[in-house]
Amino acid sequence: FKMILKIHEVLALQKFYNKLSKQELPIRLNYKLTKLYKNIESDFEFYRTRMTEIINIYGLKDDNGQFILTDNSAEVKIQPDKVNECQDKINELMNLETSELPILKLKLDELDNISLTMQEMAILEPFIEE
């Protein structure tokens, strides 16, 4: 069986994996999560590449061709007349369906040793079998 995720789900899984990768986990859970991460790596790289392209097209640049950052320096400012078009491109990217992934199931009791927020449980829910 195969599973198709959307890019925003891949990003959530990637963030979740990065958080858990700093913890010592039972070997079976560690293996399954690492395998899941490896299955989404190419989709994450596609996202990064495509997001860079979007920023290069819609990002606001100064006279030297350097991107102008928001006040908190966390993001690139978008050209004022292109904000809606840029947002449409980002939404399209985030909702893009990924390649088919092999279905990897986690047993609920395998997650007993880790603490999960409700949001993290929602991320993992498609992969859990009771």
Image (spheres, rainbow, N blue to C red):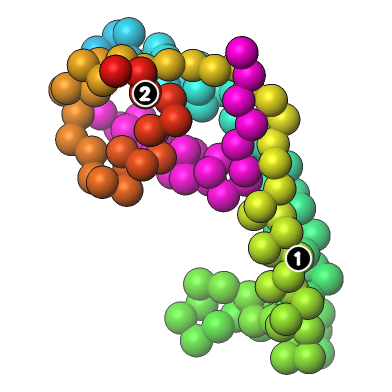
Rendered position, 28 above or below 106: above
Task: Check whether the beta carbons of the residues at disc 2 and disc 1 lie within 8 A of each other.
Answer: no
**Tag 1: residue type?**
Lys
Badge count? 2
| Magenta segment | 1-23
Q: Quick check: 42 left or right of 123?
A: right
Q: In the image, what residue occupies the spot 47% across and 38% down? A: 13
Looking at this rendering, what residue extends furthest in the front direction? 130
Q: Please state the horizontal and vertical placement of residue 124, each as a whole percent of the image.
A: 39, 33
**Secondary element type, mark 2:** strand
Residue 89's label in the rendered image is 1
- On the rendered image, what quadrant is the C terminus found in? top left
Based on the picture, tell me whether residue 41 belongs to the magenta stretch: no
Most prominent secondary structure in the magenta stretch?
helix
Q: Residue at x 50, y 86 (%)?
A: 71
Q: Measuring from the top left, give residue 48's x and y in whole percent.
A: 67, 49
Q: Nearer the viewer, residue 94 or 2?
A: 2
User: Dot 1: what SS?
Assistant: helix
Tell me the distance, in whole angstroms, between the alpha carbons under discs 2 and 1.
Answer: 32 Å
Disc nearest the viewer among 2 and 1? 2
* In the rendered image, the vertical position of residue 102 relative to residue 9, given as above or below: above
Residue 96 percent coordinates (x, y): 71, 48
Q: Is residue 13 visible?
A: yes
